[in-house]
Image: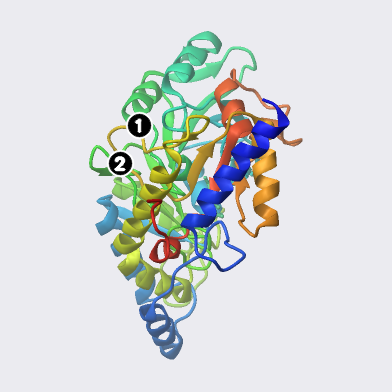
Amino acid sequence: MAAAAQDNLIDRILDRLEHLLPAQRPVPLHEPQFQANAWEKVKDCLDSGWVSSVGAYVDAFEQGLADYTGITHAVATVNGTAALHSCLLLAGVRPDDEVLMPTLTFVGTANPVAAMGAVPHFVDSAPDTLGVDAVALSDHLERISEQRDGCCFNTRTGRPIRALIVVHVLGHIADMAALRAVADRHNLKLIEDAAEALGSFRDDRHAGHWGDLTALSFNGNKIITTGGGGAVLTQDAELARQAKHLTTTAKLPHPWAFEHDQVAFNYRLPNLNAALGVAQLEQLDQLVDAKRRLAAAYRHAFDPMNELTWFDEPGGCRSNYWLNLLLLPDRLHRDGLLEAAQQRGLLLRPFWTPLHRLPMYNPMPRAELQTAEALFECGVCLPSSAGLIETAEPLG
Ligand SMILES: Cc1ncc(COP(=O)(O)O)c(C=O)c1O
C-alpha cells in the first residue's frame, strides 16, 4: 500500500480512538479499578494482624473463585506463574518431558515449563479464537508422535509429550471441546492457562471447565487484581489437596514441629493480597459488563472499516474482552499505528513476540506457525481498562 494511503488509514484509526477515549493523556493499556470496598477490606486485614499466608481472606477468596467459576476447588497462589508451575507438577510433568503450548502467548506460559527442565513445544493458533488450533495440533501430532505404553512420544526427539497448555488469549476461550478430544486421543494432560480469562465463558461454562488443571493470574494488569496473585482451579479434590500441600512447603500439620514430606514451595497468596481479591471479586460482574460495553463501542467504531479486522468474540463465547484487538493489513501499518499512537499518548501495544522467536526458546521443537506469525505481524491491542467506558461514547 502506498505511504499516503497508509498514513490515511492510521489517521482514521487514531481519529476514531480519540473520539471514543477520554481526553486525559496518557491512556494506558489496562488499569485496575478500585472501589471503597478495597480500602475497607485491606484495612480490616491489617487490623487483624493476619497479613501473611494464612487467614480468613485467603479462604474467602478461594471460595469466591470456586463459586464464580463453578469449578469446585480453587487454591490461591502468589502469582499466575506459580499457579502454572504447580499445575505442571501436579500434571506429572518431569524434566525432559515436552509440553505443547501456543507460541502466541505471554512468556509466563513457557517459563515455568523451562524452569523445571521440561521443553516447550510450540504449536499454532486458530484465527477465530486466537487460542491453540485443534485441527493443526491434531495433524501435527499425527505426523510427529506415537503412543507407547499409554504415553505420547515425539518420534523426532524421542521425548515424552506429557501435557498440552491451552491459553485463552486476550480473554477469548479456545475451542476447548475439540482440544480436550485431541488431548484425550493422545494421552496428554490438559492445562488451561486462563490468566487472562476470569469472567469469560464458552457454552455457558467458565474458563477452566475442560482442563485437568487451570491457572489464573491476578497481576495488576488483569481484569481483577490482588497486586500480584494467581490460583489453581480443579474439579479434582485430590489434586486440590496436593496443590495446597505443594504451595505451602509441603508442611505436615503439627502444633510445633517443622516436618515436610516433599520438595515444595512457598507459593500461597498472602492474606493481605487476598483481602484485595475478595473486594475485587465483588466488582467482577460490573467490570466484565463495562469491558463488554467498551468492546461494543470499539466494534461500532472499527467494524465499518474494511481495511481492518475488529476481533470479535468466537461463536458460543461470552468473553471478558481483557484486551481489545485490531488486526491491520500488515506489519508496516501495525508499526506506524503503534508509533503514531504513542506520540499522542495512546498506549497501544503489539502482541507478545511469538515465543519461538525469543533466543532461549528458539531451539525448541515446533509445528508450522503461520497463523501465530500473521496475528503477531498485524495485531494491535487497544486501551481496555473498564474505567474507560464511563467516558467513552460510541461513534454516532
Ligand atoms: C497468558 C499468561 N500466562 C501466564 C501469565 C503469568 O501470570 P503472572 O504475571 O501472574 O505470573 C500471564 C500474565 O501475566 C499471562 O497473561
| Amino acid type indicated by mark 2 | His
| Amino acid type indicated by mark 1 | Met
- Residue 224, percent across and down? 43, 62
Given residues 327 and 117, the one toward you in this image is: 327
**Which numbered tag is attached to residue 184?**
none
User: Which residue is denoted by mark 1 in the rendering?
Assistant: 176
Helix, strand or loop status at disc 2: loop
Which quadrant would the N terminus be assigned to in this image? top right
Classify mark 1: residues with Cα within 10 Å, few (<14), some (14-19) or many (20+): many
Residue lying at the far bottom in this picture: please name it. 47
Residue lying at the far top in this picture: please name it. 143
- Residue 343, percent across and down? 70, 55
Given residues 287 and 65, the one toward you in this image is: 287
User: Which residue is denoted by mark 2 in the rendering?
Assistant: 209
Classify mark 2: residues with Cα within 10 Å, few (<14), some (14-19) or many (20+): many
With respect to residue 159, does 298 lie above or below?
Answer: below
Residue at (45% x, 41% y) in the render: 302
Residue at (35% x, 59% y) in the render: 290
| Structural distance between the alpha carbons of marks 1 and 2 | 9 Å
Quadrant of residue 360 within the rendered picture: top right
* Residue 310 visible in the current orientation: yes
Given residues 211 and 293, the one toward you in this image is: 293
With respect to residue 152, does 231 lie above or below?
Answer: below
- Residue 278, percent across and down? 36, 70
247 with respect to 97 (left or right)? left
Helix, strand or loop status at disc 1: helix
Q: Nearer the viewer, mark 1 or mark 2?
A: 1
With respect to residue 251, does 294 lie above or below?
Answer: above
Residue at (46% x, 86% y) in the render: 46
Mark 1 within 8 Å of ligand 1, using the beta carbon = no
- Residue 366, percent across and down? 62, 22
